[in-house]
Image (cartoon, rainbow, N blue to C red):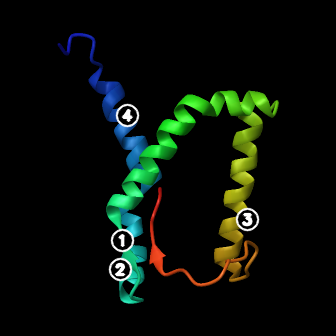
Amino acid sequence: MFAGFNWQQMISAFIVLFAVIDIIGSIPIIINLKEKGKDVDAMKATLISFALLIGFFYAGDMMLKLFHVDIESFAVAGAFVIFLMSLEMILDVEIFKNQGPIKEATLVP
């Protein structure tokens, strides 16, 4: 049953996903949301994450081809967005505008 199973690849994928999702680093954010009285719905976050994963797994490559974007350009654009978000956090300025009050908090990795 596990004859073709590569444990090294499994552990490598787990380490990468654990570092990217960073649930330990998200604990203060979750606690802060709870203290503010916002409900954190773990099941909703899990279902949204799963739907995004499946959607982009099957349609992501087709979507990039539709807009004639290669994966390298997409990676650079993503890095630029993350850079702008980090500037927003470091400099305490609002680059991306919030759209009003949020009653419920859902964390999606």
Q: Which disc number belongs to residue 84?
A: 3
Residue 101 is situated, as x and y percent measured from the top left of the image, at: 58, 84
Q: Earlier in the sequence, mark 3 or mark 4?
A: 4
Give, as a three-letter code, the residue at label 1.
Ile
Residue under pointer 1: 27
Q: Quadrant of residue 41?
A: bottom left
Are the residues tagged 1 and 2 within 8 Å (C-beta)?
A: yes
Give, as a three-letter code, the residue at label 4.
Ser
Residue under pointer 4: 12
Q: Which disc number belongs to residue 61?
A: none
In this view, the residue in front, 41 or 8, is 41
Q: Earlier in the sequence, mark 1 or mark 3?
A: 1
Q: Which marked residue is nearer to the observer: mark 3 or mark 4?
A: 3
Residue under pointer 2: 31
Q: Which marked residue is nearer to the observer: mark 2 or mark 4?
A: 2
In this view, the residue in front, 108 or 95, is 108
Residue drawn at (76%, 74%) of the image: 95
